[in-house]
Image (cartoon, coloured by chain):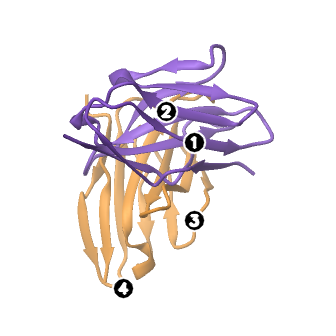
Amino acid sequence: NAGVTQTPKFQVLKTGQSMTLQCAQDMNHEYMSWYRQDPGMGLRLIHYSVGAGITDQGEVPNGYNVSRSTTEDFPLRLLSAAPSQTSVYFCASSPSGVETEAFFGQGTRLTVV
Amino acid sequence: AQSVTQLDSQVPVFEEAPVELRCNYSSSVSVYLFWYVQYPNQGLQLLLKYLSGSTLVKGINGFEAEFNKSQTSFHLRKPSVHISDTAEYFCAVSKNQGGKLIFGQGTELSVKP
């Protein structure tokens, strides 16, 4: 039972570089989302998907792109990394329904220098 | 707009003492309320959730929370804490889509022997 798997666990980027954070879930959940966690700010929603082919912006979408071609995968792309994107990134999935809980991956710690 | 405020950023407590972690929310509509726990270098794990019905909700590891609609609060309590409860705790609300959560800033619970 893998649940939500994020890769890589750690990453250091130089300013201006691009990269993709991978997220995969094996629970057949319809909803998937990306959050970033910064000290004293809790988790903030970056992008969100309610199913394959459907994505929406969250609270802090600038500098990030997403796509959802399959139910299982929801990659997060940084097109041109900036030091302000240094953070811990969490992917989450949940079944459809307003009251359902979110299941989180272990996180990716990203440092942009 | 919804928001969540966790009133204490850090709560130090001695082992076997009771603890309360405070959470207030603002919303003009009914919401669903959650408490998540994050152990060091891990993802978030659901402690408990309030959907409807009884205002006292019991969760895992001996935690419970009480929903108070008039005070728009959802405080988390445990009558006797253990060293292993040392972690960061997040209060969150969801309005209309499962997994699309708004988080508070987090409370670091530090249990000392």
Q: Which residue is mark 2?
A: B76
Q: Which residue is mark 1?
A: B23
Whether callout 1 and callout 2 share a subunit is answered yes
Q: Amino acid at mark 1?
A: Cys
* SS for callout 3: loop
Q: Is residue B3 left or right of residue A45?
A: right
Q: Amino acid at mark 4?
A: Thr
Chain ID at mark 4: A
At 25% from the left and 58% from the top, the residue drawn is A8
Point out the tag, 3 or 4, that comes first from the N-terminus: 4
Q: Quadrant of residue B26?
A: top right
Task: Name the one closer to the observer, B111 or A30.
Answer: B111
Q: Amino acid at mark 2?
A: Leu
Q: Quadrant of the C terminus of chain B?
A: top left
Chain ID at mark 1: B
Horizontal and vertical percent position of residue B55: 63, 19
* SS for callout 2: strand
Whether callout 2 and callout 4 share a subunit is answered no
Whether callout 1 and callout 3 share a subunit is answered no
Horizontal and vertical percent position of residue A29: 47, 32
- Mark 1–mark 2 CB contact (< 8 Å): yes
Can residue B14 be seen here? yes
| The furthest residue to the top | B54
Horizontal and vertical percent position of residue A62: 57, 71
Chain that is purple in the image: B
Eyeballing the image, is A43 above or below B37?
below
At label 3, counting other C-alpha atoms closer than 10 Å, the crowd grade (few under 14, some 14-19, many 20 or more) is some
Colour of chain A, in one word, is orange
At label 2, counting other C-alpha atoms closer than 10 Å, the crowd grade (few under 14, some 14-19, many 20 or more) is many
Q: Is residue A80 left or right of residue B111?
A: right
At 63% from the left and 43% from the top, the residue drawn is B24
